Amino acid sequence: MDIYKYAQSIGTVCSGLLISLPIISHTVMAQEITPNVNPCPKIFYEEPHNNRVLVPQGCPPNTLTSRFMEQGLMPATPPNERSLGVGGESPSVLNPNPSIFNESPSRRSVQPGSTLPEQPAVQTPPPDSRLQPPAAEQRQEPSARIALVNDKANIVLINDTGANVTYQVIGDTEPRRLAGKSRTNLRGLSTPITVTFQREDRGLLMVTPKTTQETGTLEVTLKETTDVNQDKSAMRIQANGSVFLN
């Protein structure tokens, strides 16, 4: 009788282990690895986004971002922030001293007692002698001038088109949607200010800024146009109150 009870106890323990093993296995398999978020999607470098959308900070510049940098509408990305390639891939790092320099036939090319031929010195210009693109105010007259209040400005954005317009205050807001035939107020923006615009139907935009009776407030009207020369996608308010369109 004791042997029978002992065997029955052993069977119960083994059955419990067999039941718990699939549960443990499913628990381990259920764990998922959170995928890395791609900070530099390739869509930023494809048309029409390549010429209409600014890339996030730290990504290689697309055509629109490069144009803003060349025109002085936004600061150039420091070299240490360009650590991501297009699509979020990390760029490969070149080895400045590859092992092939210490292996044959490279080593056999230098005989004991011989001297290496002198290489011509490379002239590196000093950093301050590099050519810098002229600022926007040096290439065109401002479209408007606004009297700032404590280096801040208010913007009344009016969408006079029949389409939705996506706008963004670089460094202050995420992309927002402004419905057709509507307006919005952006208050207390610190200069310099860069605002981008894009019609969701990919149509052209004519941007008209003008001052108002309220000091420090700029009224910006967005209208439809078929003239490519009038199409604008960004506005810049400098620290001196000058307003430029691009």
Image: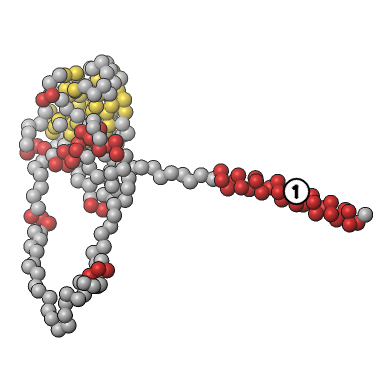
Q: Nearer the viewer, residue 51 or 54?
A: 51
Q: Specify whether 12 is left or right of 140.
A: right
On screen, residue 15 above or below 199:
below
Q: Nearer the viewer, residue 94 or 71?
A: 94
> Image point 46% across, 44% down: which residue?
34
Q: How is the structure coloured here? A: secondary structure
Location of residue 68 in the rendering, given as x and y in whole percent from the top left corner: 17, 38
Regarding residue 236, the answer to whether it shows in the image is yes
Q: Specify whether 132 is left or right of 56.
A: left
Q: Nearer the viewer, residue 16 or 122?
A: 16
Regarding residue 156, the answer to whether it shows in the image is no
Location of residue 178 in the rendering, given as x and y in whole percent from the top left corner: 30, 23
Can you tell which quarter of the image residue 98 is in? bottom left
> Image point 16% across, 80% down: which residue?
111
Name the image quarter holding the N terminus: bottom right
Q: Nearer the viewer, residue 203 or 19?
A: 19
On screen, residue 53 above or below 86:
above
Location of residue 152 in the rendering, given as x and y in whole percent from the top left corner: 23, 35
Can you tell which quarter of the image residue 201 is in? top left
Residue extending farthest to the right is: 1
> Image point 13% across, 39% down: which residue?
71
Name which residue type carries label 1. Answer: Ser
User: Which residue is the site of mark 1?
Assistant: 15
Residue extending farthest to the bottom is: 113
Location of residue 186 in the rendering, given as x and y in whole percent from the top left corner: 28, 28
